[in-house]
Amino acid sequence: MQELGRITAAIAKNGSRLGQVLSRAVVGEEIRLRDLETALEWFITWRIKLVSPDNPFWCGGVTDLNVTVDDDETISVTASIRIGPESDVMNIYEGVLQGIFHLNDNRNELSAYKIKGARLDLIRSN
């Protein structure tokens, strides 16, 4: 149970960081793609640990980002990702990630998200 608490805290921390980067896009500020790639990579790294706790995965990279601001609180993201099991870091899966991220009313944190892609279909907030 202590491990679950650590993972949940890391998801919240990295989700907050991702929300802050995405919020800059919503208000029209220019964002550095590397900042978004890094924030998304760390968020996914922690979030996918809950998908398969017996065989946790990690995210080894996010590239080729395409970001669309759908409205004042919603951002769509597609990207190429590399993920693999923690038990064998040489076993890497490459795929396409599609995500929809909703910001809170203050547009400074994630309020909900849904991420799809190879081995990622179970990632969602509510």
Image: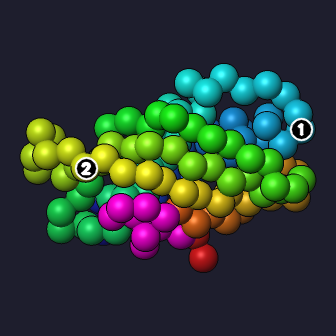
Query: What residue range appears in magenta?
Result: 116-124
Q: Nearer the viewer, residue 69 or 40?
A: 69
Residue 33, horizontal then vertical, whole percent: 61, 27
The residue at which mark 2 appears reads as: 93
Q: Is residue 10 visible?
A: no
Name the N-terminal-most of marks 1 and 2. Answer: 1
Residue 34, horizontal then vertical, whole percent: 56, 24
Secondary structure category for the residue under label 2: strand
Q: Is residue 48 visible?
A: yes
Tell me which corner region of the image, top left, top right, bottom left or bottom right, holds residue 114.
bottom right
Secondary structure category for the residue under label 1: loop
Q: Nearer the viewer, residue 61 or 57?
A: 61
Q: Amino acid at mark 2?
A: Tyr
The residue at which mark 1 appears reads as: 27
Image quarter of the C terminus = bottom right
Image quarter of the N terminus = bottom left
Q: Amino acid at mark 1?
A: Val
Horizontal arrangement in the rendering, residue 71 relative to residue 53 (left or right) = right
Identify which residue is drawn at 12% across, 39% down. 90
Identify which residue is drawn at 25% across, 67% down. 53
Q: Is residue 118 magenta?
A: yes
Horizontal arrangement in the rendering, residue 71 relative to residue 125 (left or right) = right
Tell me which corner region of the image, top left, top right, bottom left or bottom right, holds residue 56.
bottom left
Residue 62, horizontal then vertical, whole percent: 44, 37
Q: Which mark is residue 10?
A: none
